[in-house]
Structures are given as C-alpha cells and as structure tokens.
Image (spheres, grey):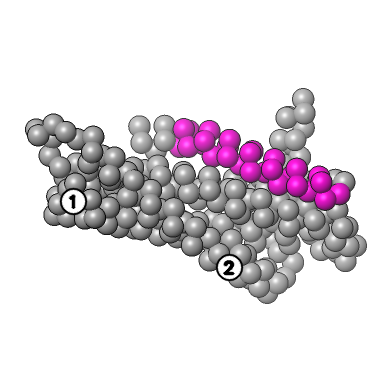
Amino acid sequence: MGFIREAGDYVILMFETFKRPDKGRVFRRQLLIDFHAMGVDSIGIVVFISLFVGGIIAMQMAYNIDNPLVPLYLVGYTTKQMMILEISPTIMSLILAGKVGSSIASEIGTMRVTEQIDALKVMGINPANYLILPKITAAMLFFPVLVIFSIAVGLGGGLLAVIITGSVTPTDFIDGLQAWWAPYDISYALIKTTVFAFIIASVSGYKGYTVSGGSVEVGRASTKAVVASSILIIVFDLILTQMLLT
C-alpha cells in the first residue's frame, strides 16, 4: 500500500509540476541556471568515463578475438554498438542519476525543511512548477547532448587504445566503426536517454519535495532518489529495448 500511495503522490505532484508557468521569463532564467548546473557541470565526468570505457571495450574485444577467421574490424564494430546502444545512454544515465539526482533531491529537500517551499506557497507561487519543471526540461534537453558527447569520446577512446596497444590497426578499427551503420541506433539511444532524464529529474524532485524532518532526512531522501532512479532506469531500459528494437 505504501508503494501505491507514493506512486499516487508522485503522479499528483507531476500534474502540479506541468502546469503552465506563471511567468515565462522566470522559467527561462531558471532553465538556464539548471542547464549549467545539471548539464555543463556534468560534461567533465561524462567525457572522462566515456574515454576510458571506450578504450577498455576495444582492448577487451581485441584480446578476446584470437581466431584468425574472425575479422579484426569487428573490434571497432562491437565497440560502436556497445557505446551507442547501452554504455552511453544507460550507464551514463546511471552515473548522472548519482550526480544530478542527488543534487536535485538535496537542493529541493533543503528548501522543504527550511520552509522556503512554504514561503513560495504563501507568495502565490506554485513551488512544484517553479522548482521541478525547469530541472525536468533541462535534463530532457541536455542529457541527449551529453550522450552524443559520450558516444563520440568513447569511440575516440577505443581508437586511441588500439593505437597505443597495437592490438588492432587503426584502419581495421575505423572500418568497423563504418560497417553496418544504422542511424536508427542513434535515435534509439536518444529516446532512451530522454526517458531516463525525465525519470532522474522527476523522481529526484519528488523525493526532495516530499521530505520531512531535518538535514538527516534530506540525506536519506538523496540516497532514496538515486536508488529509485537507478532501479527505474534499468526497468525502463528493458521495456524500451523490447519496444524499440523488436
């Protein structure tokens, strides 16, 4: 019953969140702030992780292909497919759930326990719309950009790894990147990322918005937001894969 009640509270909060903003200028200003806080500040960690993950995938594939009948360009092809279909959209979203999700939950949760949200209500402002909607919008618009960065950097990391180790020639690796190119794979990755972005921002916003107590409860809400977002990302990854790739 607790889960059903919490799901109902989440849906009600989302209805409040997606009402038309009272002042478009205020919404746009907050949106730009959230673009920087959630997107620009996450570029570094996304690039760093993608670079090394792409290199690790390429090296593992190269070292495990010991059959001379298997063409070496499959190293590049496999690296490309893994980065586009799963690593960049899903793994990066899980990482962003930890970084961005905890930040959203703690920020809004702190405003709740310090009664700033109550003050917004007294001023006639819809707190859910004012606080959560810009974050959801920023996440859904900027996270796909981060995933494109991740794919590009990951493939570059794979190429760099095979050049350094000499396990595969750069020509074979690039041939694999170009083989069986399917533009729909990129669309699939971006659709997944947009859904995951909504999950991260909305669930974290809900956990922060409904916190009660003090600073200890804010910390717990941040942890719950990351856990819940991560579980939902994995579940919806399975659902979206079944819907979009079969």
Residue drawn 19% across the image and 35% down it: 65
Residue drawn 76% across the image and 40% down it: 9
Report if residue 158 is visible in the image: yes
Q: Main secondary structure of the magenta part?
A: helix
Q: Which residues are magenta?
A: 214-240
Judging depth in this view, the residue of 139 and 124 nearest the camera is 139
Q: Position of residue 224 (x, y in %)?
A: 69, 40
Inspect the magenta stretch and tell me whether residue 175 lies in it: no
Q: Is residue 160 above or below residue 28?
A: above
Could you tell me the amino acid type at mark 2?
His
Question: Which residue is denoted by mark 1 in the rendering?
Answer: 166
| Disc number lying in front (2 or 1) | 1
Q: Is residue 17 above or below residue 39?
A: above
Task: Tell me the tag on residue 36.
Answer: 2
Residue drawn 67% across the image and 55% down it: 103
Residue 181 falls left or right of residue 223: left
Q: Position of residue 83 (x, y in %)?
A: 35, 47
Judging depth in this view, the residue of 130 and 45 nearest the camera is 45
Report if residue 129 is visible in the image: no
> Marks 2 and 1, Cα distance to the nearest angstrom?
39 Å
